[in-house]
């Protein structure tokens, strides 16, 4: 945090604001990246489950539910 204090004392308010905005933007990008990676991990099992249910419904509609 000492680096930030030195930065703030040596620069204008506009530069300090830009610096803070950059930090916040980086944090937001990191959170978005984390969330998208989590959704990607969840996406495949959800697709498999949807396909499984769809196949069961098709078999049920065809009356071929004996071997399921």
Image: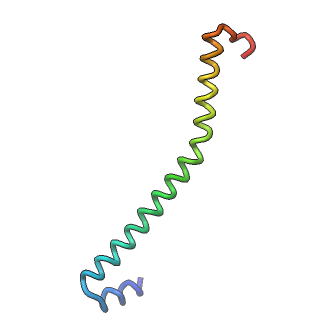
Q: Quadrant of the C terminus?
A: top right
Q: Nearer the viewer, residue 43 or 8?
A: 43
63 to the left or right of 2? right
Q: Residue at x 29, y 89 (%)?
A: 11
Instruction: In the rendered view, tell whether residue 35 sits above or below residue 12.
Output: above
| Picture quadrant of residue 49 | top right
Residue 5 at x, y = what percent?
35, 86
| Picture quadrant of residue 58 | top right
Q: Residue at x 35, y 78 (%)?
A: 19
Residue 3 at x, y = what percent?
41, 86
Please give the count of numbered marks on the rendered protein: 0
47 to the left or right of 6? right
| Picture quadrant of residue 1 | bottom left
Q: Residue furthest right?
A: 67
Instruction: In the rendered view, tell whether residue 4 sits above or below residue 21.
Output: below
Q: Residue at x 60, y 10 (%)?
A: 61
Residue 9 at x, y = what percent?
30, 90
Residue 24 at x, y = what percent?
37, 68
Q: Residue at x 61, y 41 (%)?
A: 44
Q: Residue furthest left?
A: 13
Instruction: In the rendered view, tell whether residue 44 sits above or below residue 18.
Output: above
């Amino acid at each position: 945090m000492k680096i930030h204090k030195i930065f703030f004392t040596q620069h204008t308010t506009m530069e300090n604001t830009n610096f803070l905005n950059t930090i916040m933007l980086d944090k937001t990008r990191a959170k978005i990246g984390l969330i998208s990676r989590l959704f990607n991990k969840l996406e495949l099992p959800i697709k498999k489950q949807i396909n499984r249910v769809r196949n069961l419904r098709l078999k049920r509609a065809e009356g071929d539910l004996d071997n399921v």
